[in-house]
Image (cartoon, rainbow, N blue to C red):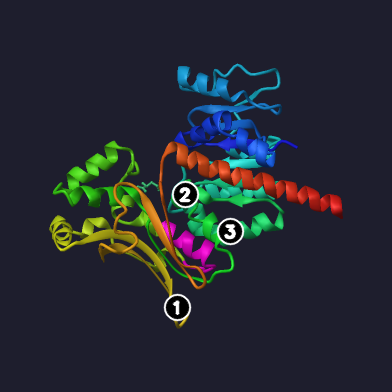
């Protein structure tokens, strides 16, 4: 059975996924039988199209490029236009929803409502929105489990770099007592630039021009973006139940250029580190803040917008993973890999039904 997908939100991330579905999913088809069809795309601004037999993705991208809208997509007799996100979830024949809407990180909405609606209608969800996962992971996981559907959120931390799936699969069985990393590309890029003598303002402007920073960079420079990722790592990987207000948060805006330049002169450097640690008494300590590290620290050499994270494991020791933390292709891949796992989940469910 082909996995039928509904895409909610069709910005850079959704289009990154569609690019991969068009050009890069043949290998997964051969290897694990992953052969999805996109039946619906609903975007608040660009319009909404649903065809129960599947959309022509190349034509979708061409239409969007030519007209900036999905409203002019030609489609078949069965094409339905104008369904909003909730109607798309409920009324389409999709098995899985790709949640990529513009969501308020502080409330997690409308993505949390979209997830709950999907689960209640026995549909899986994959997403890269941080807010819903940082705020409501346990509740969403429980609801997905009750309805025997899949929830994927790999792209919420370090985009397509497997910061969540690596510890949950390859490192399984380890007791992970500490996770610490460079979880925000904008601020790491800024520090790297400020080490060469650039001002904070010039470095931020460059990070914005290169597309690393959020539209409103406050979330990057004041540490909130990394704070949400720390909560996700603590809860999803270490099995904790922390909330954003338990994370000590100090942004890059609290660090002077002089301190950055002085550290460099002393063969040391500053990194914005997001850390969660289980103390010997069982307490959890979580923070996002500038930390001065020695040059032999595993994260000292990570420059530019690259992200990296170190897991302290009781059996395998310290494992450091490094890679992109953002980008159209990388974040599109995060959705793709979640969908491949969703496909494997659906296959497993079908096999269990056959055996019973
Ligand atoms: N603005 C973020 C960063 C993008 O700089 O890392 C990914 O969350």
Q: Residues within 10 Å of mark 2 (few under 14, many from 20)?
A: many
Residue named by callout 3: 169
Residue named by callout 2: 161
Marks 2/3: CA distance?
Answer: 14 Å
Left or right side of 44 for 183: left
| Residue 256, x across and y down, in percent | 16, 58
Give the position of the N terminus as an image quadrant: top right
Residue named by callout 1: 283
Mark 3, ligand 1, within 8 Å: the answer is no
| Residue 202, x across and y down, in percent | 18, 43
Look at the magenta stretch and give its main secondary structure.
helix
Q: Which residues are magenta?
A: 228-242
| Residue 66, x across and y down, in percent | 46, 17
247 or 261, nearer to the observer: 261
Looking at the image, is mark 2 or mark 3 earlier in the sequence?
2
Which residue corresponds to the image point at 35% horizontal and 48% vertical from the top-left? 306
SS at mark 1 in the image: loop
């Amino acid at each position: 059975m082909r996995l039928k997908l509904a895409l909610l939100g069709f910005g850079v991330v959704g289009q990154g996924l569609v690019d991969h579905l068009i050009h890069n999913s043949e290998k997964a088809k051969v290897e694990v039988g992953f052969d999805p069809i996109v039946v619906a795309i609903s975007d608040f601004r660009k319009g909404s199209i649903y065809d129960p037999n599947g959309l022509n993705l190349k034509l979708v991208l061409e239409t969007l490029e030519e007209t900036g809208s999905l409203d002019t997509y030609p489609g078949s007799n069965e094409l339905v236009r104008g369904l909003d996100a909730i109607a798309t979830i409920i009324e389409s024949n999709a098995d899985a929803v790709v949640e990529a809407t513009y969501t308020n990180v502080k409330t997690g909405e409308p993505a949390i409502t979209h997830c709950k609606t999907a689960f209640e209608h026995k549909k899986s969800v994959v997403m890269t929105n941080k807010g819903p996962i940082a705020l409501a992971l346990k509740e969403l996981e429980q609801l997905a489990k009750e309805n025997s559907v899949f929830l994927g959120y790999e792209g919420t931390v370090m985009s397509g770099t497997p910061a969540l799936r690596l510890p949950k699969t390859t490192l399984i069985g380890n007791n992970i007592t500490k996770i610490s990393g460079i979880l925000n590309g904008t601020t790491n890029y800024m520090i790297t630039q400020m080490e060469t003598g650039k001002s904070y303002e010039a470095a931020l402007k460059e990070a914005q021009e290169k597309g690393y920073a959020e539209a409103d960079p406050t979330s990057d420079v004041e540490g909130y973006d990394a704070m949400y990722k720390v909560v996700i790592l603590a809860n999803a990987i270490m099995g904790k139940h922390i909330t954003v207000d338990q994370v000590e948060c100090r942004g890059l805006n609290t660090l002077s250029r002089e301190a950055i330049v002085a550290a460099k002169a002393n063969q040391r450097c500053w990194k914005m580190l997001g850390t969660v640690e289980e103390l010997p008494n069982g307490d959890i300590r979580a923070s996002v803040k500038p930390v001065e590290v020695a040059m032999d620290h595993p994260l000292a050499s990570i420059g530019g917008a690259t992200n990296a994270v170190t897991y302290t494991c009781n059996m395998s020791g310290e494992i450091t993973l490094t890679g992109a933390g953002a980008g159209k292709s990388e974040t599109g891949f995060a959705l793709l890999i979640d969908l491949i796992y969703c496909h494997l989940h659906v296959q497993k469910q079908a096999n269990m039904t056959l055996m019973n």
